[in-house]
Amino acid sequence: MGYTVFYLSAIVIVPLSMIFFNTIPMGWEPFLNAVTAPRVLASYRLSFSTAFFAAVVDAFAGLLTAWVLVRYRFPGKGVLDALVDLPFALPTAVAGICFATLYSPIGWFGQILARWNLQIINTPTGIVIALIFIGFPFVVRTIQPVLEEMELEIEEAAQCLGATRWQTFRKILLPHLFPALLTGVTLAFARGIGEYGSVIFIAGNLPMKTEIAPLMIMSKLDQFDYAGASAVALVLLCISFSMLLLLNAVQEWQQKEYRS
Amino acid sequence: MPIIQKAKSKPPVAKKRVSDPISIQILLIGLTLLFFIGFVFVPLGLIFSQAFQKGWSFYLDAISEPYAIEAVKLTLLTVAIVVPVNAVFGVAAAWAITKFNFKGKTALKSLLDLPFAVSPVIAGLIFVLLVGSRTPFGSWLGELGIKIIFSTPGIVIATIFVTFPFIARELIPLMEAQGRDEEEAALTLGAKGWQIFGKITLPNIRWGLLYGMILCGARSIGEFGAVSVVSGHIRGQTNTIPLHVEILYSEYNFTASFAVASLLVFLALLTVIVKSGMEKHFQKNSFHL
């Protein structure tokens, strides 16, 4: 046990606290200046909005996939089920160059979209696409177990009482799946905010337009602006943590509701 | 925060079930397939088509040129250090959390989730701040002739940080489900701590441990953001495989970049296959999972 605590403090607590120690000497005024610079604000806004949209798409795609994988039988199901984990296992840089090539104006998808004058690469849409890929397994893998455990009797009862399939889904299944869905979506969202490798290739990294927050940290580091980099990181960290805390609180509240 | 984990639950029930009309089934399966085609199958196909665009000999050259070999070696070295270190830690943490009661247990558990919530770039940044050459601790190490950032130790440490929860997260539910009965029985029969661990605990958790190690290894091979911050991108010295892919790509050497990337795809596919194979195995022979 002593070993565990020691290891954790050496690997996690001490390094993480460095962010605070590097920010504190800055003083309040320069800190605020650093994190409210227009370019930094734009990057926060971009990271949050793209991660949000990607998480919403993942909610639908994840729910659909989990449903199909748990409830239906069809050839190739095992393969799909295994491939859900691919975004976890595939190095993010590989995903990044892959999507960047696919959606470039001469790429397979990019060519088709170019006919309608749609450009994906170097736009926020491209970032959303990369983040959908990255966040997808989080949603599927949190819903799947809950759906598997669900008693079919409840649905049967609903049907016997004359509910249509859609009513059953909306009134019975969805409320039951909601906590898991929320967890999965929050995880995908949190991951999306911090994601770096898969995004930088497709984003084009244009200042004010497609520069994500982790990239801001990176470029400040490249200029040896350690204090500035920690300031940007501190804000990002605080936001991700409060989001996870909020999620925990919501889950506890839901469990209480569920019991009573 | 629950880790993503597939339910290893009961086998499918054979009884007649409520189900949707066949037309809806086909529609939903079709939509799912469409999503997979767009986001998984076509991208995978693209990687291989790009990698082999200039033929086999170019492919083989790209993956066997000296810088590529150095990158593979460095990545393998990193994995060889990170996985055992995290395995020891993972077992110790899971052991401490499940077999003892103490204050701050919940805090410890949430600390385990931390790397999931931290951006990989921040994971790299904190180690630059801690032991980089411009910090007091780093310059002291520098005087001793130890260089951590922009060299292999930095890459290893950053990777350890990013991957340390995987094994503990896999073991905690497993060890919780097993309870302490067997260990306590052994204790009353006079077994020593290490004997109990080696003869009872370890055999009980070996599959979970292996599973966690596979996930940890896969993530160590592919880690990009954190490693990118601490590596310094020195070709042939501090370039891991993903970083090598990035450099080739940014030099517009796309075919070579995808060739090296295809190696990582093979590894990722292998991981996914082994993972789903082990899950099936668990479901069949499970007494606790």
Image (spheres, grey):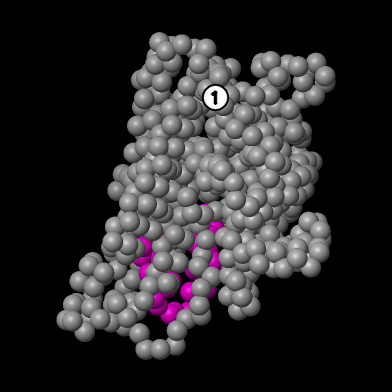
Q: Position of residue B168 (x, y in %)?
A: 63, 52
Question: In the rendered structure, the residue with mark 1 lies on which chain?
Answer: A
Above or below B153: residue A73: below
> Can I make out residue B83 in this image?
no
Q: Position of residue B7 (x, y in %)?
A: 50, 67
Total marks drawn? 1
In this orientation, which residue lies closer to the viewer: B20 or B243? B20
In this orientation, which residue lies closer to the viewer: A127 or B219? B219
From the viewer's perspective, is B163 left or right of A138? right
> Can I make out residue B119 in this image?
yes
Segment tinted magenta in the rendering? A60-87
**In terms of image quadrants, where is residue A59?**
bottom left
Residue drawn at (70%, 64%) of the image:
B184
Residue drawn at (28%, 82%) of the image:
A156
From the viewer's perspective, is B120 left or right of B56? left
From the viewer's perspective, is A244 left or right of B135? left
Q: Position of residue A38 (x, y in %)?
A: 36, 20
The residue at which mark 1 appears reads as A19
**In terms of image quadrants, where is residue B270?**
bottom right
Residue drawn at (38%, 58%) of the image:
A180
